[in-house]
Amino acid sequence: MKQYFSNYKDKEFLLSFFTAILFFAVSLVINFYAGMYATKSASSPVTDIILSNIRVFDVGYIFTYGAMLFWVFAFLLGLYHPKKFPYALKTIALFTIIRAIFISLTHIGPFPTQLIVENGTILSKFTFGGDLFFSGHTGLPFLVALMFWDKKVLRWIFIVCSLIFGVIVLLGHIHYSIDVLAAFFITYTIFHISLYLFKKDRKMFLG
């Protein structure tokens, strides 16, 4: 326990910790305005090889509360391993900013039968309807899996979460199939960018 709290007396850790929080806060602001812009600028929907051939399923509960459960688990994991927190949060912030750029450039309208996400939840503050490419529900768990790749159990937990969310957003017609498929490739690239940008934080993460 004493060793745990000693992390919060380390000046280098504290600087990285608060920088990560600030970077993450900025990424959320950027994501908000990008999502609003993308939704306002959305064009007509397009056909999709998967969505056009399956009916819409009511997966709103899993989409909303499954994601919330995932983030609670990830947050508790960060609290349990505080030295992993700065790198993880900075990488998630980087993911959020890069995704905000993508959704600002791509304005395809939602699929006509898209499931409407329940209003009044925290998640509804981060999803806008037009922020489609690429899928954050699919990409973020995969990103965390890449971070914990050397931890076999955690790796597979997050990979399974990523696959489940990918299926869920397709069943709910919430994302196009290209949003889900591209998420894995773009997320992999973002992870490697983070290794270059946050070398010291990654070293602390692995320590």
Image (cartoon, rainbow, N blue to C red):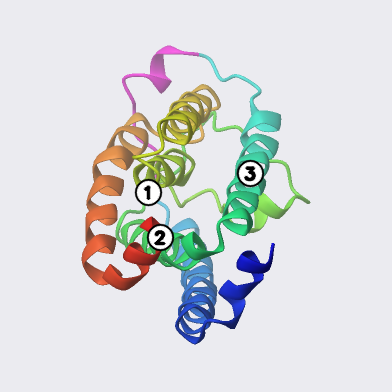
What residue is at 60 percent from the left and 19 percent from the top? 57
Q: Nearer the viewer, residue 118 or 144?
A: 144
* 184 is within the stretch colored magenta: no
Q: Secondary structure at mark 2?
A: helix
Could you tell whether 185 is left or right of 80 in the image? left
Percent position of residue 80, x then y: 62, 54
97 over 141 or under it: above or below: below
What residue is at 39 percent from the left and 66 percent from the top? 204
Q: Secondary structure at mark 1?
A: helix
Cα distance between the residues tagged 3 and 2: 18 Å
Task: Specify few, some or many for label 3: CA neighbours under 10 Å numbering under 14, 14-19, or 20 or more.
Answer: few
How would you classify the magenta stretch by its main secondary structure?
loop
* 48 is within the stretch colored magenta: yes
Q: Earlier in the sequence, mark 3 or mark 1?
A: 3
Asked if the residues shown at circle 2 and circle 1 are in contact, with their CB atoms under 8 angstroms apart, the answer is yes
What amino acid type is highlighted by mark number 2? Phe
Q: Quadrant of residue 44?
A: top left
Q: Nearer the viewer, residue 16 or 171?
A: 16
State the extent of the magenta-drawn residues as a range.
Answer: 44-54
Q: Earlier in the sequence, mark 3 or mark 2?
A: 3
- Judge depth for marks 2 and 1 and give the one in front: 2
Percent position of residue 102, x then y: 31, 57
28 over 22 or under it: above or below: above
Q: Nearer the viewer, residue 92 or 135?
A: 92
* Residue denoted by label 1: 147
Task: Specify few, some or many for label 2: CA neighbours under 10 Å numbering under 14, 14-19, or 20 or more.
Answer: some
Asked if the residues shown at circle 3 and circle 2 are in contact, with their CB atoms under 8 angstroms apart, the answer is no
> Can you tell which mark lies on residue 114?
none
> Can you tell which mark lies on residue 205?
2
Q: Quadrant of residue 202?
A: bottom left
Percent position of residue 15, x then y: 48, 84
* Residue denoted by label 3: 73
